[in-house]
Each structure stands twice: as structure tokens, then as C-alpha cells.
Amino acid sequence: MTITFWTEDKIVKAEKLWKEGLSAREIAVMFGSKKNTVINMASRNRDRFPSRQDAWHPQPKAGPPVQPIRNPDRVTRVTISGAHVTMPRVPCIDGPAEP
């Protein structure tokens, strides 16, 4: 027979602490266990322990698009790897500088 660490009483107490906003590590310290045991128990009882991931990554605010700074002495090139780099303008390749 296996002894279960998470009894119903402990799960109810952990649920209350979770809803109060305590982290998994803080809950684990209170129960004398490890953070991963709290995380695993919460994932098994997802209906009682809702995910907090939405709160960690807030959606960016929609605003006017940021216009890049244009320097007439520099151009943007795409490298073989696909990276966009800014380099000095070469008049024989890029033509004269824009006014």
C-alpha cells in the first residue's frame, strides 16, 4: 500500500493558498515538501488550481506602429542566415543617399 502525501485536507489548504496568490515554492515550504510536488498535484487537479500563466505574460498594448529611424548613411541588409543587419551605405551598390 502506498502512503499518499496529498490528502484531501492538504489539497483544500493548498487550494486556498493558491487562490491567495502564493507561489508553488511557498506552498511547498508550508507543507514541508518540494515545489515540484505542489506543481504536479496542481496539474492533476487543474479544476481546483487554475493556470496562472496568463497573468505572467500580459498581452502587449496595441498602439501606433513604431517607425524605424532612417539614417541616410546606413542601409538594412539581410544576411544568408536571414538576420537583418544595418550597415554603412556603399554608393556604388546602394546608389546615392536619400535626401
Image (cartoon, rainbow, N blue to C red):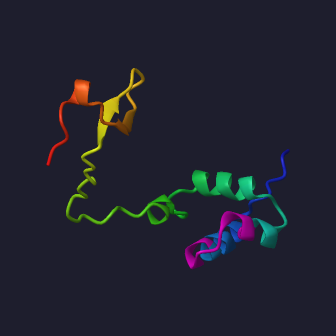
Residue depicted at x 22% and y 58%: 65
Residue depicted at x 72% and y 69%: 27
Apparent side of residue 24 relative to residue 52 in the rendered image (left or right): right
Apparent side of residue 51 relative to residue 26 in the rendered image (left or right): left
Furthest residue toward top:
80
Q: Position of residue 4 (x, y in %)?
A: 79, 54
Q: Quadrant of residue 38?
A: bottom right
User: Is 22 or 93 nearer to us in this picture?
Assistant: 93
Q: Position of residue 92 (x, y in %)?
A: 24, 25
Start and end of the magenta stretch? Answer: 18-27
Q: Position of residue 90 (x, y in %)?
A: 30, 30
Mostly what secondary structure, the magenta segment?
A: helix
Residue depicted at x 65% and y 68%: 23
Inspect the magenta stretch and tell me whether residue 19 lies in it: yes
Apparent side of residue 28 relative to residue 77 in the rendered image (left or right): right
Q: Quadrant of residue 94?
A: top left
Inspect the magenta stretch and tell me whether residue 49 lies in it: no
Compared to 97, does 26 lie above or below? below
